[in-house]
Amino acid sequence: MSHEKELWVIIAFFIAGLLSLTNLMGQQRSQLRRLDRKLDILLKAQGIDWPMLSPQVQLLAQSPANKIAAIKLYREENPDLDLAEAKAEIEAFAAKK
Protein backbone atom coordinates (compact mmCIF):
# COMPACT_ATOMS: atom_id res chain seq x y z
CA MET A 1 0.00 0.00 0.00
CA SER A 2 1.33 3.42 -0.89
CA HIS A 3 1.97 6.04 1.75
CA GLU A 4 -0.89 8.15 0.42
CA LYS A 5 -3.36 5.27 0.81
CA GLU A 6 -2.07 4.51 4.30
CA LEU A 7 -2.59 8.14 5.24
CA TRP A 8 -6.19 8.06 3.97
CA VAL A 9 -6.89 4.88 5.95
CA ILE A 10 -5.50 6.48 9.10
CA ILE A 11 -7.59 9.61 8.50
CA ALA A 12 -10.72 7.49 7.91
CA PHE A 13 -10.18 5.58 11.19
CA PHE A 14 -9.56 8.83 13.03
CA ILE A 15 -12.78 10.37 11.69
CA ALA A 16 -14.74 7.20 12.53
CA GLY A 17 -13.35 7.33 16.06
CA LEU A 18 -14.32 10.98 16.46
CA LEU A 19 -17.84 10.29 15.23
CA SER A 20 -18.21 7.41 17.66
CA LEU A 21 -16.94 9.55 20.52
CA THR A 22 -19.30 12.38 19.60
CA ASN A 23 -22.23 9.97 19.55
CA LEU A 24 -21.25 8.53 22.94
CA MET A 25 -20.94 12.01 24.44
CA GLY A 26 -24.38 12.93 23.10
CA GLN A 27 -25.89 9.83 24.69
CA GLN A 28 -24.23 10.61 28.02
CA ARG A 29 -25.45 14.20 27.86
CA SER A 30 -28.98 12.95 27.22
CA GLN A 31 -28.78 10.53 30.15
CA LEU A 32 -27.47 13.28 32.43
CA ARG A 33 -30.35 15.57 31.45
CA ARG A 34 -32.88 12.83 32.27
CA LEU A 35 -31.23 12.28 35.66
CA ASP A 36 -31.17 16.02 36.25
CA ARG A 37 -34.90 16.30 35.57
CA LYS A 38 -35.60 13.41 37.96
CA LEU A 39 -33.46 15.02 40.64
CA ASP A 40 -35.27 18.32 40.12
CA ILE A 41 -38.61 16.56 40.67
CA LEU A 42 -37.36 14.93 43.87
CA LEU A 43 -35.91 18.18 45.22
CA LYS A 44 -39.09 20.08 44.38
CA ALA A 45 -41.17 17.43 46.16
CA GLN A 46 -39.03 17.98 49.25
CA GLY A 47 -39.36 21.77 49.02
CA ILE A 48 -35.70 22.29 48.19
CA ASP A 49 -35.01 25.08 45.68
CA TRP A 50 -32.02 24.06 43.56
CA PRO A 51 -29.79 25.24 41.98
CA MET A 52 -29.51 28.15 44.31
CA LEU A 53 -28.63 31.46 42.78
CA SER A 54 -25.62 33.25 44.18
CA PRO A 55 -26.32 36.53 45.98
CA GLN A 56 -24.79 38.44 43.04
CA VAL A 57 -27.09 36.71 40.54
CA GLN A 58 -30.10 37.26 42.79
CA LEU A 59 -29.31 40.97 43.03
CA LEU A 60 -29.06 41.27 39.25
CA ALA A 61 -32.15 39.14 38.62
CA GLN A 62 -34.35 41.38 40.75
CA SER A 63 -34.23 44.12 38.11
CA PRO A 64 -35.63 43.45 34.61
CA ALA A 65 -32.97 45.82 33.25
CA ASN A 66 -30.26 43.46 34.53
CA LYS A 67 -31.83 40.21 33.32
CA ILE A 68 -29.20 39.56 30.63
CA ALA A 69 -26.36 40.28 33.05
CA ALA A 70 -27.93 37.90 35.58
CA ILE A 71 -28.20 35.14 32.98
CA LYS A 72 -24.62 35.70 31.86
CA LEU A 73 -23.25 35.58 35.42
CA TYR A 74 -25.37 32.53 36.25
CA ARG A 75 -23.99 30.68 33.21
CA GLU A 76 -20.44 31.64 34.23
CA GLU A 77 -21.09 30.16 37.67
CA ASN A 78 -22.79 27.07 36.18
CA PRO A 79 -20.99 26.24 32.92
CA ASP A 80 -22.96 23.01 32.48
CA LEU A 81 -26.19 24.96 31.90
CA ASP A 82 -27.18 26.00 28.42
CA LEU A 83 -28.69 29.38 27.67
CA ALA A 84 -32.31 28.21 27.78
CA GLU A 85 -31.86 26.54 31.18
CA ALA A 86 -30.13 29.58 32.67
CA LYS A 87 -32.78 31.92 31.28
CA ALA A 88 -35.55 29.75 32.74
CA GLU A 89 -33.92 29.77 36.18
CA ILE A 90 -33.48 33.54 36.19
CA GLU A 91 -37.04 34.12 34.99
CA ALA A 92 -38.42 31.70 37.59
CA PHE A 93 -36.52 33.53 40.33
CA ALA A 94 -37.68 36.92 39.08
CA ALA A 95 -41.30 35.71 38.96
CA LYS A 96 -41.12 34.68 42.65
CA LYS A 97 -39.98 38.15 43.73
Image (tube, grey):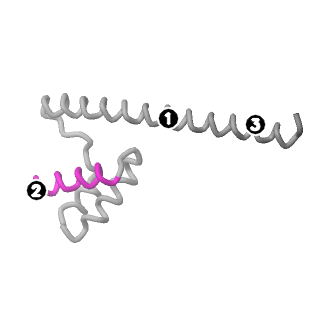
Which secondary structure lies at badge 1?
helix
Q: Residue at x 26, y 55 (%)?
A: 87
Whole-percent x and y of residue 26?
44, 36
Which residues are the magenta region?
Answer: 83-97
Q: Is residue 1 left or right of residue 36?
A: right
Instruction: Answer whether residue 87 is magenta in the image.
Output: yes
Mark 1, residue position: 23
Mark 3, residue position: 10
CB within 8 Å, label 2 to label 1: no
Q: Real-space Cα distance between discs 2 and 1? A: 41 Å
Q: Of the residues under marks 3 and 2, which one precedes in the sequence? A: 3
Mark 2, residue position: 97
Q: Real-space Cα distance between discs 3 and 2? A: 58 Å
Labelled disc at residue 93: none
Instruction: Answer whether residue 56 is magenta in the image.
Output: no
Whole-percent x and y of residue 66?
25, 68
Q: Residue at x 41, y 36 (%)?
A: 29
CB within 8 Å, label 1 to label 3: no
Whole-percent x and y of residue 12?
69, 38
Q: Is residue 61 left or right of residue 3?
A: left
Which secondary structure lies at badge 3?
helix
Residue 77 vertical position relative to residue 16 in the rendered view, above or below = below
